[in-house]
Amino acid sequence: MGISFKEVSHYYRGLKKKDITIALDKINLDIEGKGEFVSIVGKTGSGKSTMLEHMNGLTLPSEGTVQIFDYVITPKKKKNPKMKDIRKRVGYVFQFPEYQLFEETVLKDIMFAPMNFGMKEAEAKKKAIEVAKLLGIQSLLNKSPFNLSGGQMRKCAIAGILAYEPDILLLDEPTRGLDPKAAADIMRIFYDLHKKTGITIVLISHDMNIVYEYSTRIVVLNDSHLTYDGDKVELFKSGIYKDNHLTKPDVLKLIDYLNEKMGYNIDYNTFNLQELMEKVVKLHE
Ligand SMILES: Nc1ncnc2c1ncn2[C@@H]1O[C@H](COP(=O)(O)OP(=O)(O)OP(=O)(O)O)[C@@H](O)[C@H]1O
Ligand SMILES: [Mg+2]
């Protein structure tokens, strides 16, 4: 088991004693340490980011326990394990990771985290170059990270996390603010990495097209409650997506239209527009 939530609640306390926001309410959830691509979805303020922060010990539960591999995190700070050990195994890409950059060059920035986790300099350099190639930023290695575009900065920050090879990668809206091509490119990189190495990915996204294309499983939050955990096709076949203020992915809207208006009978096991076009062409062959 990779991550296990047992009756986890999280309260944010305001200035006054009675100002309490319940961000998570008695959540139970198990995520494998290998081979899963889980998307967390739900409307704004439903508790997604708070939930992700519990997955590598950035936030402590108010009630309940979070187990991350062999480490058990409880509401009691003093009893908790060393967070550094957990962070090495579970990498967290913040919503705007570019704010975390600080070194003189992109290369040094990517090398920082792996060296901080004990990797030797030569090995960290080799690894940094390898991930920079994977992300297509190898030509930027000697530049200052502050002279890059927003999308390049984000890739640089992501490279710094991939360089220490975590078992689980947490992504909070990694495509937000990127142009459509850059967003598609970066999702493809995460997906290929997941396929190649089996790294478990936990993704928060409001983009149902991305969620439907890549997830092996979807978790839905609604007003601090977990309201769905399971198969992506089932979620959109049932009315549950509507009850949780989600919209259908474009490919499913198009399938509904073709089936209703044109008499087709295409099933929901079609995860992007390319697959749909190929299915339609095949039906006419
Ligand atoms: N630092 C904080 N202090 C007080 N309340 C907070 C804090 N962070 C989040 N909250 C509240 O907790 C609830 C859950 O917030 P969270 O950021 O987890 O939602 P989210 O699902 O990630 O939303 P979004 O889709 O907008 O990113 C919200 O009601 C939010 O206002
Ligand atoms: Mg959020």
Image (tube, rainbow, N blue to C red):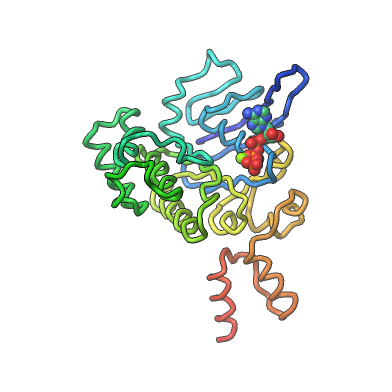
Of residues 83 and 263, which is closer to you in this image?
Answer: 83
Q: Position of residue 229 (x, y in %)?
A: 66, 45
For this orientation, the residue located farthest to the bottom is 285
- Answer with left or right where residue 225 lies relative to residue 212: right
Which image quadrant shows ligand 1? Answer: top right
- Answer with left or right where residue 111 lies relative to residue 54: left
Residue at image location 52% in from the left, 48% down from the top: 37
Residue 73 visible: yes
Of residues 153 and 91, which is closer to you in this image?
Answer: 153
- Quadrant occupied by the C terminus: bottom right
Residue at image location 68% in from the left, 56% down from the top: 234
Image vertical order of residue 253 relative to residue 187, above or below: below
For this orientation, the residue located farthest to the top is 78
For this orientation, the residue located farthest to the front is 147
Q: Position of residue 157 (x, y in %)?
A: 41, 41
Q: Position of residue 65 (x, y in %)?
A: 60, 25
Q: Position of residue 171 (x, y in %)?
A: 51, 43
Residue 48 visible: no
Image vertical order of residue 125 relative to residue 54, above or below: below
Q: Which quarter of the figure has residue 14? A: top right
Residue at image location 34% in from the left, 39% down from the top: 110
Image vertical order of residue 52 relative to residue 116, above or below: below
